Amino acid sequence: MHYNNVDIPSETRVGDFTSKPTEFSLARWSERFFAWLIDFIIVSIGIEILFYAATFPLWFDSNPDRWFRGGASIGFVVRSLIFLAYWTYFESTGGQSLGKRIFHLKTVGISGQTVNVRDALLESFGKSFLLPIDLILGWIFTNDKRQRIFNRASNTIVIKLRSQTEENSSSNVHYRKDN
């Protein structure tokens, strides 16, 4: 089977499972957390730089509080929208954010296909706005494939990139938890 530079079957061959089963090594929760943490730090630094650059004229205002009344909820929404755009873009174009690249992880469709923009948007919404709820419910209800709730809703999984192994089995796709 032909593999592209990210160690999963190329898109032209993903649907060709007639003779050989495919096994995905599911990413560990800890690897996913550290990849998310790297993304969070990088994007947060970028957001803060943009915020300080955009508010530079206000630094010289004698009463800056008038500009930021009730800004905590607006700040959360704006930051979350930026995270949503970041994850949606990277996961729909290559399946990997910067943190996932470092840990050799990739978000793919449940059968190994590339994630489309709609699924990437849905999957990213959970970790941008509702991560604690998304994660806890995922641990409770979808731990067999290590999916958060929004991974399950978007039919995506996060895999560890490595060579695919072949097994004799009647099923075409297998999932293995990496210890």
Image (tube, rainbow, N blue to C red):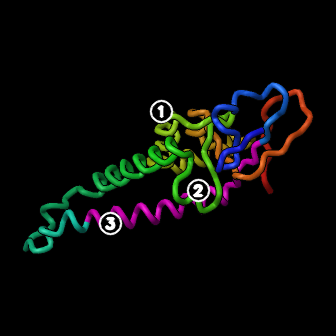
Residue lying furthest top in this view?
A: 18
Q: Earlier in the sequence, mark 1 or mark 3?
A: 3
Q: Earlier in the sequence, mark 1 or mark 2?
A: 2
Q: Which residue is mark 3?
A: 48
Kindly report the distance in space between the C-alpha atoms of the residues bearing marks 1 and 2.
20 Å
Q: Earlier in the sequence, mark 2 or mark 3?
A: 3
Amino acid under disc 1: Arg
Q: Magenta segment, which residues?
A: 24-51
Residue lying furthest front in this view?
A: 2
**The N terminus is located in which quarter?**
top right
Question: Main SS of the magenta segment?
Answer: helix
Label 2 SS: helix
Q: Is residue 34 magenta?
A: yes
Kindly report the distance in space between the C-alpha atoms of the residues bearing marks 1 and 3.
28 Å
Locate residue 69, reporting x and y percent: 19, 59
Q: In the picture provided, is 104 more to the left or to the right than 74?
A: right
Question: Which residue lies at the image location 75% right of the left edge and 43% below the top edge?
Answer: 24
Within the image, what quadrant is residue 23 found in?
top right
Q: Tag 1: Cα neighbours inside 10 Å, few (<14), some, or many (≥20)?
A: few
Label 1 SS: helix
Q: Tag 3: Cα neighbours inside 10 Å, few (<14), some, or many (≥20)?
A: few
